[in-house]
Image (spheres, helix red, strand yellow):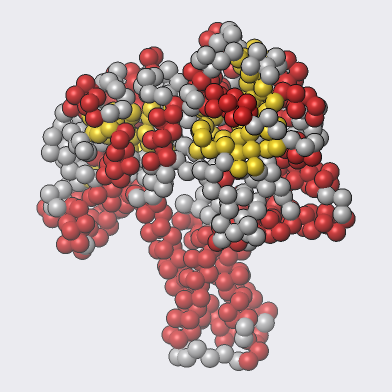
Amino acid sequence: MQLSIIIVNYNVRDLLLNAIASLNRALSGIEGEIIVVDNASSDGAVELLGRDYPEVLTLPQDRNLGFGRAHNIGISHARGEYILILNPDTVVQEDTLREMLQFMAEHPNAGAVGCKIVHPDGTLDAAAKRGFPSPWSAFSRVFGLSRLFPRSKLFGGYNLSWIGDDTTSQVESLSGSFMFFRASVLRELGGFDTDFFMYGEDLDLCWRTRKEGWEVWYYPGTSIIHIRGESTRRSSLDSIGMFYDAMEIFARKHFRSPFLLLLVRLGILLRRGIARIERLFPSLSFAAIDVGAVLVGFIISTLLVIGELHFPDYAVPWVFVAPPTIFILTIAASGGYGVDAGRLSRTLLGYLVGFFILSTLTYFFEEYRFSRGIVLATTGISAFVGLTARFLILLYRRTYGRESARRVAVISGGSLSLPLRDRLRETLLGRPVSLVGIITPTFSHLDKVGEGGIGSIENIARIVREHRLTDVFVIDSEIGYGEAISAMRLCAGESVRFHLMRDARDGGVGGEIMATGSVRHSYVPEPYRQKIPLTKRLTDRLLALVCLFLFPFLTMFGGKGKLTIKGLLQSLIGQRPLVRGATSNSGEPEPVFSAATVYSDQIHDEKSLVEIERYYEANRSFMLDCEIIVSSLRAPHYTESVGEGVSREVVH
C-alpha cells in the first residue's frame, strides 16, 4: 500500500467529514487508506463515519488521549509506505497526495515534507515552515521584530519568514496539521513523544527526524486549507497553558545548557503572561483610548478649575499617573476590557467607581485636596470622550468591520435549491444574512444560473469588493478543492471568509455554519405604541433629532432617496417608529429604518421577516439602532429584483 492517512478527531465531526470528502478525491488512482482515531468525541462522529464512510478505519477511544498518543495508535495500524499526519479541520487539493508522493520519490533523503497551508480568509499560515524555538527567535517574535523585518534571517527565525512562501526549501519544522512522512522514519523514531499532550509534539518529531540525518522539506507546489483551532475551541482544555507547557517540555528535552534553558523559560513565561492578558482582556486596545481620554479630561478640567496647567512640585508626576491608572483598573474590574467590552454601561461603571476612589484619596492625602474639583470635571470629560470614542469604534466595527451583517454569495454552476437557500438565509454566526447572489466557475456558466449570477471566480476579488461580501460558500461538488483554494488566494487581504459545503446535493452544510432552527410559529407584530416601551420611544425621538440635525450630511453619505425630513419629523413627534427589525403591522406606519433593508435579500418571505424581527427584539439597544441607521444608509440601492433573495448586479 502506498499511503496511510491518519486523522485524530475530537468533536469536529462536520469538519472531519469535509476532510474525508476531499481525501477521497485526492486518493483517486492511489492505493491508500484513511485511519481516524476518535478521542472520545461526543458529537456522533464515530456513528456517522460507520454509516457514510464504512471504508474508513475508525478507532474510537474511551478518553481523550491527546494528539501524539492517539496518532501513535493510528501509526501502529498503518500499512502504507508513507504516512500523512493530517488535522481534521483541513481540506486537501485534488493533486496534494500525488504531489507529495512524487516529491518523496525524487528526494530519497527526505524524511518528511509539508506543503503550503491556506486559511479560510485566503492568507497563508506562517506555521507551514518553522524554525526551532530559541531565546532570540522567541524574543524577536514577542517584541514584533519578526513582523518588522520578515525577510531578515536575524529576526525571522521563528517562522523562517525569510524563505519565500513559494520557495521549495529545507526547513527545521513543519506544522502538525499536515506532515507527510516516510513510514519507516516514523517507526524508526518511535512515533510521537507522549510527554506532549497537545502542541509541541510536531516540533519534537521534526527535531528528532533531522537529528537522525533525515531532511525536512517545505514544498509549496500544492496547498491545503486549514481552519485553525476548531478542536481547541470546542474543548474545555486550557490551550494557552498546554501550549507553553509543551514549549517548556521541548526546551528541557533538547536544550542541555542550563543558561540557555533559563533564557527559554523566561521567554516562555513572558509570552505566556502576554497571551493570558490578551485572553482575559480581548479588548485591551480600548485601554489606550481610556488613557488618552483621562489625560485629555484632566488637562481640560485643570485649565477650567485652576486656570493654568501648573501643580506643586510634589504633585508631579502623580497627578498625571494616578488618575489614568485608577480609571484603567476600575474599568478593567467592571469588565470594560473583557468579553462584554461592547456594553458601554461597563465602561461607565468603571469611570464612576474611579471617581469615588479618587475623591476618597483626596481625604487621606490633604496636600492633594486642591484637586477635588479637578477630579469631578476630569471624570465627566473623560467619560464623555472615552465613551464617545468607544461608541464610534464599535459602531464602525458593526457597520463596516468584522462584526457587520453577513453578506453571502455562493460559488455554484447552477441555481440554488430552496432548502439550501433557506439555510443560507438564516442566521450565520449570530448575525443576520443577506444572500447576494451566485458566483459561477466561469463566465460561460452565467447563462445557466440565470438572473442570480453576479460574476465568476475569474474576477472574484472584484466581486467581493464591490458587493462587500463577508462570506463565500462553495457548494458545487463539480468545483475542485484546488479551484476553491485558488479563489481564496485571489481574495487574500479582503475581509471575506470561505466555507466549503460537505454535500450540496442534500443541502448539508459544513461545520462552520451555525444556523437557527426552523420557525414554528408565525410572528404577528403588535401595534407600535403598545409593543415598544417608553425607553425605546425616547431613543427613537433622540435619534430622529440627531438625524434631522445631520440631514444634509446623511443625504450625501447615502441617504438620498431613502431619507426624508417628513419621515424624521413623524418619528420625532411619535407618529412613526424610527427603527425596527422588520416591517410594521398592517395599518401601522412603516419605520424609517428597518433591519430588513440592511440584512436584505430583495424579497422577504414571512419566515425571513420573523427571523429578522426576533433578532432585533432579542438584541435591541441604542447601539443596534445606530447600527441599523448607518447600515441602511450605506446599503446598495437595487433597482431591479430578479428572484427570491438575489439581485441583478453582474460584475464582468
Say left or right for 79 vs 116. right
Residue drawn 61% across the image and 75% down it? 322
Residue drawn 64% across the image and 42% down it? 170
Residue 243 percent location from the top left of the image: 70, 43
Q: Quadrant of residue 121?
A: top left
Report if residue 252 is visible in the image.
Answer: yes
Report if residue 245 is visible in the image.
Answer: no
How many numbered discs, if any? 0
Q: Is residue 14 above or below residue 243?
A: above
Say left or right for 620 vs 343. left
Residue drawn 78% across the image and 44% down it? 250
Residue 594 percent location from the top left of the image: 25, 42
Give the camera-side residue of 199 and 511: 199
Residue 480 percent location from the top left of the image: 41, 24
Q: Is residue 448 above or below residue 499?
A: above
Residue drawn 58% across the image and 7% down it? 54
Give the camera-side residue of 9 and 348: 9
Give the camera-side residue of 226 and 564: 226
Say left or right for 477 vs 145. left
Give the camera-side residue of 117 and 2: 2
Residue 352 percent location from the top left of the image: 53, 65
Q: Quadrant of residue 506?
A: top left
Q: Quadrant of residue 321?
A: bottom right
* The C terminus: image quadrant: top left
* The N terminus: image quadrant: top right
